[in-house]
Image: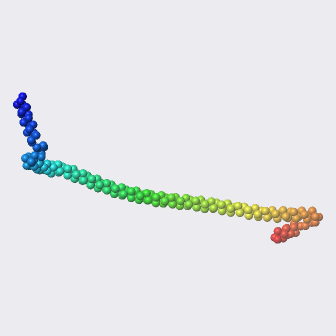
Amino acid sequence: MATATTEAAGQAAEVASAPGMPQLNFDHWGNQIFWLIVTLVVIYLILSRVALPRISAVLAERAGTITNDIAAAEDLKQKAVEAEAAYEKALADARIEANKIVADTRAEIQAELDEATAKADAEIAAKTAEGEKAIAEIRANAMESVEAVAKDTAAALVSALGFSADDKAVDKAVADRMKG
């Protein structure tokens, strides 16, 4: 047991005499710097030959996709503008056509109305002419009747007064009186 304790004490002394961290031991720095450089070169080669080309390919693909999407969006936007312009033109044409149809319909209705009015005016004029003709006939008949009644009345009055008059004298007196 003494040997084991001596050995353990020797190891403890060795550990106590050695510097703390091996990375800070100046005896190993040359080795550490060499492996650091080798490791950095290997990492650089791996990154530059494998990882970075893949990353740049993904970035280029994304940029291409974004560019294509932007171009497609611009194309669709242009088509939408053209479609809107075509829609506005069609709407304006439809409004013009509707106004033309309305004007034509109004003209037709006005022509029909004018025709109906002219027909009604002609009918009214014809009926008015017939009425005036009838009135003229009635007046003529009335004048004849009035003259006949006046002659009969004059003859009756003269007889009632006890005078006698011949028909010619009564006719002449009534005719003179009717003239004014």
Q: Is residue 94 left or right of residue 39?
A: right
Q: Which residue ends up furthest to the right in the rendered image?
A: 162
Q: How many marks?
A: 0
Residue 139 picture location, percent across and down: 76, 63
Visible residue check, residue 1: yes
Depicted 141 relative to depicted 24: above or below:
below
Residue 145 rendering spot, x and y as whole percentages: 81, 62
* Quadrant of the snapshot with the C terminus: bottom right
Colouring chosen for the image of the structure: rainbow
Left or right placement of residue 123 versus residue 88 in this view: right
Q: In the image, is 58 to the left or to the right of 120?
A: left
When asked about the image quadrant of residue 135, the answer is bottom right
The x and y percentages for residue 125 are: 66, 62
Specify the farthest residue to the left: 3
Nearest the camera: 89 or 64? 64
Residue at the spot 62% in from the left edge and 59% down from the top edge:
120
Question: Does residue 20 sit above or below 53 in this rendering?
Answer: above
Pick the front one: 148 or 168:
148
- Going 8% across and 34% down the picture, which residue do you hit? 8
- Depth order, front residue of 12/115: 12
Residue extending farthest top: 1
The residue drawn where x is 85% and y is 64% is 151
Q: Indicate the quadrant where residue 77 lies.
A: bottom left
Residue drawn at point x = 55 percent, y = 58 percent: 109
- Pick the residue in front: 88 or 160: 88
Residue 81, given in percent of the width and then of the height, sits at 36, 57
Q: Quadrant of the N terminus?
A: top left
Visible residue check, residue 46: no
